[in-house]
Amino acid sequence: MPTKSYGSADTQPTSDRLDPALLRIAGIVLLGAVAALLDTTVVTVALDQLGKAFSAPVSTVQWVSTAYLLAMALVIPLTGWCVDRFGSRWTWLAVLALFLASSVLCGVAWSAPSLIAFRVVQGLGAGMILPLTQLILARAAGAQRFGRVMALVAVPGNLIPIVGPVLGGLLLDGLSWRWIFLINVPVCVPALVLAWRALPADPVDSGRHPLDVLGIALLSPAVLALVYGLAQAGEQSSFVTAGTTVPVAIGLGLLAVFSVHALRAKAPVIDLRVFRFRSFRASAVLMLLTGAALYGPMFLLPLYYQQARGFDALTTGLMLAPQGIGTAVALPIVGRLADRVGLRPLVAAGALITTAGTLPYTLLPTEPNDLLLSASLLLRGIGMAAVGIPAMAAVYQQLPPTAIPRATSTVNVIQRIGASLGTAVIAVILQQQISHGPGGAHAYANTFWWTVGFALLLLPCASLLPARKRIQP
């Protein structure tokens, strides 16, 4: 049994280099994160085949994706408590094993209801994997290496949404839909073995961390209702239907009651007192907006290429690849700059670059130049990396080590709501442009102006970040 324990947010390592031990931890947890993120994206291109395989209507099959995302949102608030109570190593092993087992069950599903049920279980595992990845690496890095480690965390989050649809298209063309889920087996099995053998243990005091039952009973349904209501807004192309306003109102009401409870409770499942740290407040705002700025266009771009341009799923994935390439190129550079020059200038530059990379899509009514659009996506990928890394690094900049687990849960909930909000807004605007506006390429061009607005909103957020804290070499 490993006995080595993690570092903490306020430890000062003897060197600020990314040493082999840290890189080994990063490789182990990122392998698991890749599997969870792949399942969020590859399934989107398989819904048509799933409907045909189970003779199910679209209204039923879409729950294969929706149930997974809702289950992920439901379980995120529990992540911090599980780490406090059982330790990050045992929590990681448990949720990864759950994700692996449910992936196999999804792969052998015999009906649409059985697949949806197994996807719920799979989402419960995946929902903890992503915040755990962020938490484990933040603890292991120490304050001097936050920027570069957050760059590692961002790799799967930024690349998988681009690679996933391409991989999904290849799997569906060459194999059956079952491999959309079974592909997780060769990823998760080595990830589990490596984690069991090499992931350091962290000491826990089980008696000090009682479960906040009331907090869970308020917060999890609140997040679930908000994400569901926003998803319904996107599907129904309106914010004023009962399917949208009722769950959103319920979610906001439960969230308000939870806030009162969390400020009074001794050990709430999510500690809102972390908002007293300026860096955390700034990061929370940035995570909300980056969720909208990233996931809104991720919804819009494939639709443009498939509906307005007539491309198939594989070609669409290839057309979106430059954004992932831009992110991949920028991540190591941004990570180093975050540790050396500070967070404010990176966020400001990233907001401007993201805006510049989005503007060409507002010119779609003219004859589109694919080379210009590809270059724009490359630029947009660089910009989103320049914003996303500082946003994640700022979460931990001023926090004491004991606050890290529950703060991680908090920002992941915020980002999930931001992603749902951005997607819903873009879906509603696009449908209104198609139904009541000019339609065609003009509808997409007008909707892309909203994504430009999301990018510009990131610019003033740079001033919210703390001033650069100089680190002695």
Image: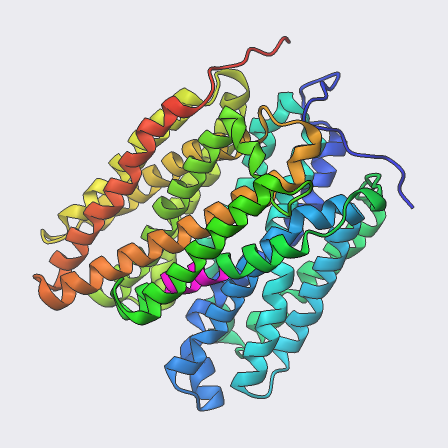
**Horizontal relation, residue 222 to residue 3: left or right:** left
Colour scheme shown = rainbow
Using residue 314 as the reference point, say whether residue 437 is left or right of it.
left
Dominant secondary structure (helix, strand or loop) of the stretch shown in magenta:
helix
The magenta span reads 224-231
The verdict on residue 230 being magenta is yes
Specify the farthest residue to the top: 472
User: What residue do we see at 43% from left, 64% from top?
Assistant: 228
Residue 336 visible at all: yes
- The outermost residue toward the bottom is 55
Q: Tell me where residue 198 sits by quadrant.
A: top right
Determine the residue positioned at 44% across, 23% down: 465
List x then y, in percent, for residue 112: 52, 84
Residue 376 lies within the magenta run: no
Closer-to-camera residue (198/422) = 422
Q: Position of residue 121 (x, y in %)?
A: 63, 70
Q: As rendered, which of 193 and 297 lies closer to the eye?
A: 297
Q: Give the quadrant of the C terminus.
A: top right
Q: x%, y% of residue 15?
A: 71, 17
Query: Residue 353, relative to residue 1: is it above or below?
Result: above
Residue 183 visible in the snapshot: no
> Which of these two is toward me, 367 or 406?
406
Left or right of 48? Residue 35 is right
Q: Residue at x 75, y 16 (%)?
A: 14
